[in-house]
Amino acid sequence: MYKFKTYMKQFHPIVWVLLTGTILTRGSAFMTLPFLSIYLSRNMEMSPIIIGLTVGMSPLMGTIGGFIGGHLSDRYGRKPIMLFSLFGLAFVYFGFMMADSQGWFILLNAFNGLCTSFFEPTSQALMADLTEKNHRMKVYSLRYTAINIGASVGPLMGAYLANTSAKLSFAITGGTYLVYGVALIILLKKLVITQEVPNKKKVSLVDALNIVRTDKALRFLLLGIILINLGYVQMDSNFPQFLENTVENGVVIFSVLLTINAVMVIFLQMPISHLAEKYTHMQGMVVGSIFMTIGLIGFGFVNGWITAIAAIVFLTFGEILIFPANNMMLDQLAPEHLRGTYFGAGQFRKIGDFIGPIIGGFFMKEFQDGIMFWIIALITFSSIIFFKAGNHTFIKMKATDKEKVV
C-alpha cells in the first residue's frame, strides 16, 4: 500500500485525471472509428478510395490543427483548448449518429481530426508541465498504456454493435466525451494547477512556425514518424476491409486482433519501456520500425487466425517501442516555452494517417492479394533513414550548444 501511494504521488492529480479520461474516451472511440470504414462500406455504398478519403480527413485536419492548437495552448493556457476540443468531439459523434450522406461524414470526420489534434498535444503538454523531467518517459508510457486499456475493451463492443446498432456506438462515444468535458471543468476548479497560466514568453504563430521549420532534427523525426503512421494506419483502414473480403469471420478476427494489440500494450508497455531505458530512444525506434515492417509484411500473408495473430504481435512490439519514445524525443527537442507548439508540430505525423488509407486503398484496388501490404511495409521500413538522420542532427546540435556555453 505504501509503495502504491508513493507511486501515485509521483504525478500531479490532474495527470491521473487525464489518464483516467483517456481510458474512458479512447475505449468508446475504439468502438466506432476502427469500424467506420466497415460502416461506410455497408451503409453508404462508397468505393474503397472514397472510404479512404473519408477516414483520412481526420488525420488531414490533424496535421493543420495540431500545430495551431498546441501553439494556442502555449499562448492562452491548456484549459480552454482542452475543453473546446472535448465538447467539439461530443458534437462530432452525435453528428455521426444522424448523418445520412457521405458529405456529412467527410465534414464531421474532418472536425473530428481538428478537435482531436487540439486536445492531444495540449493534454500531453499539460502532463509534461506537471511532471518532473526524470518521470516524463514514465508518464508518456502510462498515457500510451491508458489508450490501450480503452482499446482492449472498445473493439469487442464495437464488433457487436457493428452487426447490431452502429449508431448506438456513436451515441455512447459522444456521451462519454460530453461527460468527460463536464467532469474536467469541475475538477480543474477544485485541483490547483500553479503552472497552468498563459505563457509569459509569448511567441506569435508565424515565429513559432519559423522556429519549428528551422529545427532540422524535428523535421527528420517528423518525416520518419509520418512513414511509420502511413504503415500503422493500415490496421484501422484497409486491413479490416481486406479481412472481411478474404477471410471467413473477418470482422470477428479484426476485433480480436485489436484487443490482442491493446492487451499486449497494457502488460508489456512498462516492462519494455524499462528495458529500453538501457538504450537510446533512437535505438528503440529503429528496432520498433523493423518489428512494424515485419508485422505489415505479415498482413499480406494472413489467411486465418494463426497468421493474423502472428502479424499483430510483431506490429504491436513495433508500436510499443516507437510511439512513447517519439513523444520523449519531442519533449527533449522542445524549448520550455514552446512545449505545446512542439507537441502540436508532432501532429504533422498524421500526414501519414491521411495518405496511408488512400495509398493503401489504391493498391488494394489494383492488386487483389496482399501485395499492397508488402509495398506499404517497404515504405515504412525507410523511416529508419530519417530517424538516424534526426538523431545525428540532434547530437550535433547538443554538442554545438555545449561549445557555446564553454
Image (cartoon, rainbow, N blue to C red):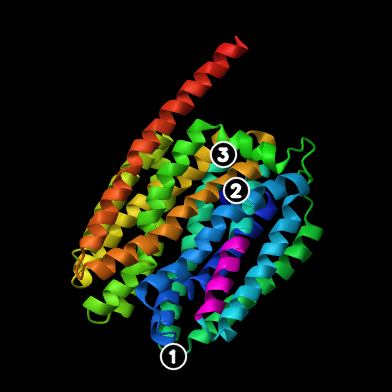
- Viewer-proximal residue, 376 or 179? 376
Instruction: Say if 158 sits above or below 206 in the image.
Output: below
x, y percentage for residue 236? Answer: 39, 67
- Viewer-proximal residue, 75 or 259? 75
Q: Is residue 393 left or right of residue 298?
A: right
x, y percentage for residue 83? Answer: 72, 62
Tell me the residue that label 2 is attached to: 344
Q: Residue at x 69, y 69 (%)?
A: 87
Q: How many marks?
A: 3
Tell me the residue that label 3 is attached to: 331
- Viewer-proximal residue, 181 or 343? 343
Helix or strand or loop: what does disc 1 sit on?
loop
Q: What residue type is disc 2 on?
A: Gly
Nearest to the eye among marks 1 and 2: give it. Answer: 2
Crowd tier of the residue under label 2, counting other residues whose Cα lies within 10 Å: few below 14, some 14–19, many 20 or above:
many
- Viewer-proximal residue, 345 or 183? 345
Q: Residue at x 44, y 79 (%)?
A: 158
x, y percentage for residue 379? Answer: 30, 49
Q: What residue type is disc 3 on?
A: Asp
Tell me the magenta residue range. Answer: 102-115
Q: What residue type is disc 1 on?
A: Thr
Of the numbered discs in the image, which one, if any, rests on residue 164? 1
Q: Are marks 3 and 2 in contact (CB under 8 Å)?
A: no
Judged by its main secondary structure, the magenta piece is helix
Q: Residue at x 71, y 63 (%)?
A: 84
Q: Is 114 included in the stretch rendered in magenta?
A: yes
Nearest to the eye among marks 3 and 2: give it. Answer: 2
Question: Looking at the image, is mark 3 or mark 1 earlier in the sequence?
Answer: 1
